[in-house]
Image (tube, grey):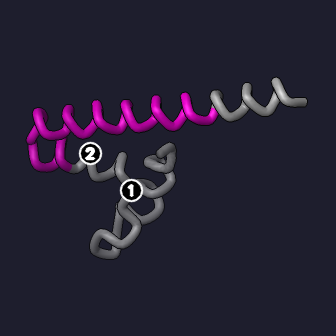
């Protein structure tokens, strides 16, 4: 989820959409297509997915520390 800068600078998401990541897709929808509402919705969904993944990671981390 943190690969926007590398992909944008090196390939721009191409050739075609072969190396496009979620952040780059959100950027293209928002600023290249000028669809700010859809881009904002994608950003919120990406944030929620990140929060759930982070919460699951910390839950597993603390569960392993209690057993150790």
Q: Is the C terminus in the top left, top right, bottom left or bottom right quadrant?
A: top right
Indicate the quadrant where residue 54 lies.
top right
Question: What residue is pinned by disc 2?
Answer: 26
Of mark 1 and mark 2, the one earlier in the sequence is 1
Question: What residue is pinned by disc 1?
Answer: 21
Given contact means CB atoms under 8 Å apart, are the residues at marks 1 and 2 in contact? no
* Element carrying mark 1: loop
Residue positioned 44% across, 48% down in the render: 4
Is 53 included in the stretch rendered in magenta? yes
Horizontal and vertical percent for residue 37? 11, 33
Q: Say the numbered circle drawn on residue 60.
A: none
Which class describes the residues within 10 Å of circle 1: few (<14), some (14-19), or many (20+)? some
Residue positioned 36% across, 72% down in the render: 18
In the picture shown, does residue 49 fall above or below 21?
above
Residue positioned 39% across, 56% down in the render: 21
Q: Which residues are magenta?
A: 29-57
* Element carrying mark 2: helix
Is 4 included in the stretch rendered in magenta? no
Q: Is residue 42 left or right of residue 55?
A: left
Indicate the quadrant where residue 55 lies.
top right
Q: Is residue 57 left or right of residue 68?
A: left
Q: Is residue 43 left or right of residue 7?
A: left
Horizontal and vertical percent for residue 46? 35, 38
Horizontal and vertical percent for residue 56? 57, 34
Q: Nearer the viewer, residue 36 or 57?
A: 57
Q: How many marks?
A: 2
Residue positioned 26% across, 45% down in the render: 26
In the picture shown, does residue 57 fall above or below 22?
above
* Main secondary structure along the magenta-highlighted residues: helix
């Amino acid at each position: 989820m943190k690969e926007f800068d590398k992909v944008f600078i090196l390939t721009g998401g191409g050739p075609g959409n072969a190396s496009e990541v979620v952040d780059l897709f959100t950027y293209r929808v928002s600023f290249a297509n000028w669809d700010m509402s859809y881009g904002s919705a994608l950003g919120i969904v990406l944030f929620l997915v990140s929060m759930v993944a982070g919460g699951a990671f910390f839950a597993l981390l603390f569960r392993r520390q209690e057993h150790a």
